[in-house]
């Protein structure tokens, strides 16, 4: 048993109060503009209001982080945006005879086949599927070419190259000399893609992150720390998101 009431704290923050019999502790959740407090019936209202006021700064910090995330995330919608070579590129979605993706000077156009039955697939899911396929094709050509180019330059040659989707990594190298790259690398600036490829190639010599390893990376890419930083600062935006 539970019930929800809209409340306003003395600091002017609106929040939803969800009273719940089985709940033992108070929980505070922030989902963009919505602030939700889940509390047992026994906790006095004044206590909850004070808590929200006390947590005002914390709530606002989360809200601004969430706003920033929305601004910099891929948005697979009619007038959305998608990361491509390190730029948030405007995304145009329209309908045509057949599904295809075309890249313009300033935007990426996703054309959805009007003939296809929609069933229960949302438009953003169809956009995602098309873009995924297109990114994979682009990655196959671009990353294979880059790898060959850096292999020649560094004299480090992998035994095999795989281009796939990985949830939590941009690339990896194993002790058989197989290098795997994430096709989502196509969302990164070219200089950062170079860094990831050189990083993996250097693992062919040192299968660790020792000082020798980083020295080798630096010998090929003196500014590698800058690229590493870009990756760290942006990587949480570089995923597909649909509603
Ligand atoms: Zn590594």
Image (tube, helix red, strand yellow):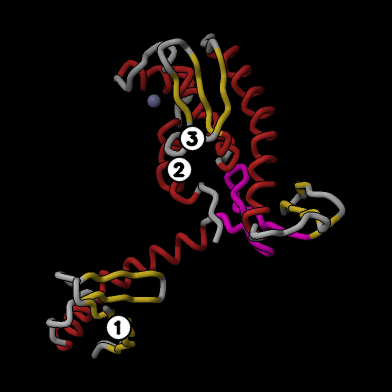
The local crowd at label 2, few if under 14, some if 14 to 19, many if 20 or more residues have their Cα within 10 Å, is some
How far apart marks 1 and 2 lie (CA) works out to 45 Å
Secondary structure of residue under mark 1? strand
- Circle 2 residue: 230
Q: Quadrant of residue 235?
A: top left
Of the numbered discs 3 and 1, the one sitting upstream in the chain is: 1
Secondary structure of residue under mark 2? helix
The local crowd at label 1, few if under 14, some if 14 to 19, many if 20 or more residues have their Cα within 10 Å, is few
Q: Quadrant of residue 160?
A: top right
Q: Which quadrant contains ligand 1?
A: top left
Q: What's the residue at 83%, 56% (across, down)?
A: 115
- Circle 3 residue: 166
Q: What's the residue at 49%, 29% (across, down)?
A: 196
- Circle 1 residue: 3
Check residue 90 for magenta coloring: yes
Label the magenta part by its dominant secondary structure: strand
Query: In the image, 47: left or right of 61?
Result: left
Of the numbered discs 1 and 2, the one sitting upstream in the chain is: 1
Q: Residue furthest front?
A: 1
Q: Is label 2 or label 3 in front?
A: 3
Does ligand 1 reach within 8 Å of label 1's beta carbon?
Answer: no
């Amino acid at each position: 048993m539970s019930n929800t009431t809209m409340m306003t704290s003395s600091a002017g923050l609106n929040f939803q109060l969800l009273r719940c019999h089985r709940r033992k502790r108070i929980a505070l959740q922030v989902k963009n503009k919505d602030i939700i407090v889940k509390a047992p019936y026994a906790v006095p209202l004044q206590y909850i209001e004070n808590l929200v006021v006390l947590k005002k700064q914390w709530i606002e910090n989360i809200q601004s982080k969430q706003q920033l995330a929305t601004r910099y995330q891929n948005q697979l919608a009619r007038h959305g945006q998608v990361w491509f070579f390190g730029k948030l590129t405007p995304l145009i979605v329209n309908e045509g005879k057949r599904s295809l993706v075309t890249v313009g000077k300033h935007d990426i156009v996703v054309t959805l086949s009007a003939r296809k039955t929609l069933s229960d697939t949302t438009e953003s899911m169809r956009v995602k599927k098309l873009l995924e396929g297109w990114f994979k094709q682009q990655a196959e050509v671009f990353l294979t070419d880059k790898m060959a180019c850096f292999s020649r330059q560094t004299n480090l040659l992998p035994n095999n190259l795989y281009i796939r989707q990985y949830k939590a990594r941009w690339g990896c190298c194993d002790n058989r000399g197989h290098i795997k790259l994430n096709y989502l690398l196509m969302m990164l600036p070219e200089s950062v893609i170079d860094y990831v490829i050189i990083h993996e190639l250097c693992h062919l010599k040192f299968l660790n992150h020792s000082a020798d390893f980083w020295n080798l990376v630096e010998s090929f890419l003196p500014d590698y720390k800058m690229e590493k930083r870009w990756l760290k600062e942006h990587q949480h935006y570089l995923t597909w998101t649909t509603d």
